[in-house]
Amino acid sequence: MNFNLSRNQFFLILFVVQSGSSFFSFPSPFVNAAGRDAWLVFIVAGALHYMLLLFYERNYKNFKIGPFVGWLYKIYWLFLTIVYMAYIDYTLAVWGFPETPQIIVIAVLVTVSLYANLSRAETVINLSVMLIPLIFVFVIFLQFAWKDLVWTNLFPFGESTGAEWAKGFLKAQIAFIGSELYVFFRKHVDSKQKIKGRPLFFYQILWFTFFFFSVLIVILYYTPRGLERLPEPLLFLLKAQEVTFVERLDLFFLYIWTVWTIITIVIISFAALYVHRLHFNEHQKRDTIIWHIFLVLLPLFFLSKGFVEKLNDVIIYLYLVFGLFIPLIVILMNRRKQK
């Protein structure tokens, strides 16, 4: 599969996948795990994320995988899309479409991915552009809550225990999921456009600010005890805001989140099919259809709240394997072979 990315397209794909389905659900488990110092924990986690991107940038040319590792990543991305599909469908059933059969909602979401991945690669690449205005709108509308923020919630800091810091670092990995696409797509970026240095640092600042803002506003708006009972605190925050131009602000952004998740699933499916075609270039249309049949059927087994919570816990450990350890092992082995 041949395709070219501009620097902006590359960073936008990374940003969409890294925020994707996890953004609205990220603050609650992270803040509950890290305690009052969650904002400090995330600053340190953000620095580690930047170090990871620098490692990817320095070594992406040595990331060359065989069929076995390719199959591992395809299984991982299949699991990831199943988790995202199950989570967004469960959330839509609770918030937006309680009477709609869940298989219909899933089928509609998957149809978009099927159409995009049966089209040219540029269709998937350019699909992320439509999210740019929606992301800005979301950030702007969160400003309605500023009058209700309690800034003293940040203090006193430095009271989180070592165990809370460790749990907080683990939960912070949710915001890193998707960064592994860096080593897969980096070689397709226009060689005339520089990534290392200021462009990569600017992307890191953008990613960090976006997630840090969500963490900060949740800490300032909710009490620790109240946050424990809210799986999607940003949606509850939006629901509490009274505006004249729309009756339910939370539902408006729930639909934006749905579009966000759909595009994330499209990109992850594109990545899985891209890796598949590195070693199996025949029957592309058939394989694309089979992949999306799995996406319709498999999430149906994990639509309960208990399953969704368990899958969200498991996915953190899988990311550590596929986002950190496997790239590290593959890169070191390829560098050793070159020597």
Image (spheres, helix red, strand yellow):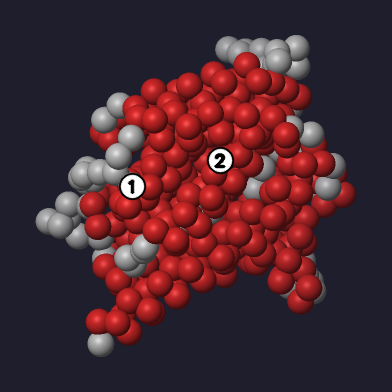
Residue 177, percent from left and from top: 53, 54
Residue at image coords 58%, 28%:
296
For the residue carrying disc 2, how many other residues have a C-alpha within 10 Å: few (<14), some (14-19), or many (20+)?
many
- Give the mark nearer the N terminus: 2 vs 1: 2
Q: Nearer the viewer, residue 239 or 195?
A: 195
Q: Is residue 132 visible?
A: no
Question: At numbered mark 2, what does the secondary structure look like: helix, strand or loop?
Answer: helix
Quarter in which the N terminus is drawn: top left
Residue 74, percent from left and from top: 48, 50
Residue at image coords 63%, 41%:
83
Question: At numbered mark 1, what does the secondary structure look like: helix, strand or loop?
Answer: loop
Drawn side of residue 48 relative to residue 272, left or right:
right
Numbered mark located on residue 280 in the image:
1
Residue 90, percent from left and from top: 71, 29
Of marks 2 and 1, the one in the foreground: 1
Q: Looking at numbered disc 2 in the image, what kind of residue is underneath it? A: Thr
Residue at the front extreme, as displayed: 282
Q: Looking at numbered disc 1 in the image, what kind of residue is underneath it? A: Phe
Residue at the right extreme, as displayed: 225
Label 2, on which residue?
81
Residue at the left extreme, as displayed: 192
